[in-house]
Image (cartoon, grey):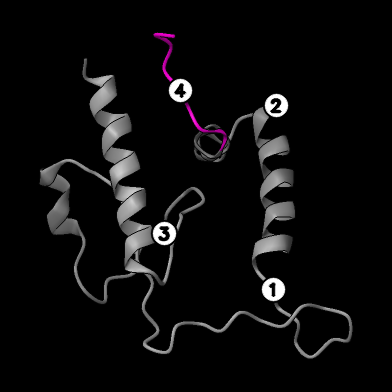
Amino acid sequence: QGEEYVEFCSIAAAAVREDREPAISSAVTFFLTLRGVVVRRSHGQPGRPPNRPFPSDRRTLRGTTMPAKNLDFFQKGKKYRVPMPLATSAKEDVAFDFMEGSYRRDMSRKR
């Protein structure tokens, strides 16, 4: 009790962002393994699970919190690189849950 709870995915993402040994090697192995489970590219290969269909409107959503001063950076059509794994979903309610979790985590740190 009283200790801050940090999700494993947050720890692994921090290891990728910081890009330092020894954590980066383990984090890369973890994310490559995870990609093999989550991202299914069958390309018609027998025995491979079928591809998950990409959303028909080609839209994915991300839910997070950030300082208001950074909002102007994000404009429709702008491409940018994120130096860490980035949770995305085609479902609005899932992205909203990401945002709420991020908000609760960030607000708990301000106490």
Which residue shows up at 21% across the image and 15% down it?
A: 111
Q: Nearer the viewer, mark 4 or mark 1?
A: 4
The type of residue carrying mark 3 is Arg
Q: Quadrant of residue 80?
A: bottom left
92 w.r.t. 96: above or below: below
Q: Which residue is mark 4?
A: 5
Q: Could you tell me residue 93's position as x and y percent?
A: 33, 62
Identify the amino acid type marked 4. Answer: Tyr
Of the two numbered discs 3 and 4 on the same chain, state the one appearing first in sequence: 4
Q: Are marks 4 and 1 in contact (CB under 8 Å)?
A: no
Please report the bounds of the magenta region as a residue range.
1-8
The reply to whether callout 3 and callout 4 are in contact (CB within 8 Å) is no
Location of residue 101 with respect to 80 vertically, above or below:
above
Q: Residue at x 29, y 44 (%)?
A: 100
Nearer mark to the viewer, of 1 and 2:
1
Q: Who comes first in sequence, dot 4 or dot 1?
A: 4
> Are the residues tagged 1 and 2 within 8 Å (C-beta)?
no
Q: CA distance from mark 4 to mark 2?
A: 23 Å
Reading the image, the residue beneath label 3 is 81
- Name the residue carrying label 1: 40
Mark 3: which secondary structure? loop
Q: Secondary structure at mark 2?
A: loop
CA–CA distance in space, label 3 to label 4:
28 Å
Task: State the CA–CA distance, disc 1 to disc 2.
Answer: 29 Å
For label 2, the residue is: 22
Task: Count residues near mark 2 (Cα–Cα under 10 Å), then give few for <14, some for 14-19, many for 20+.
Answer: few
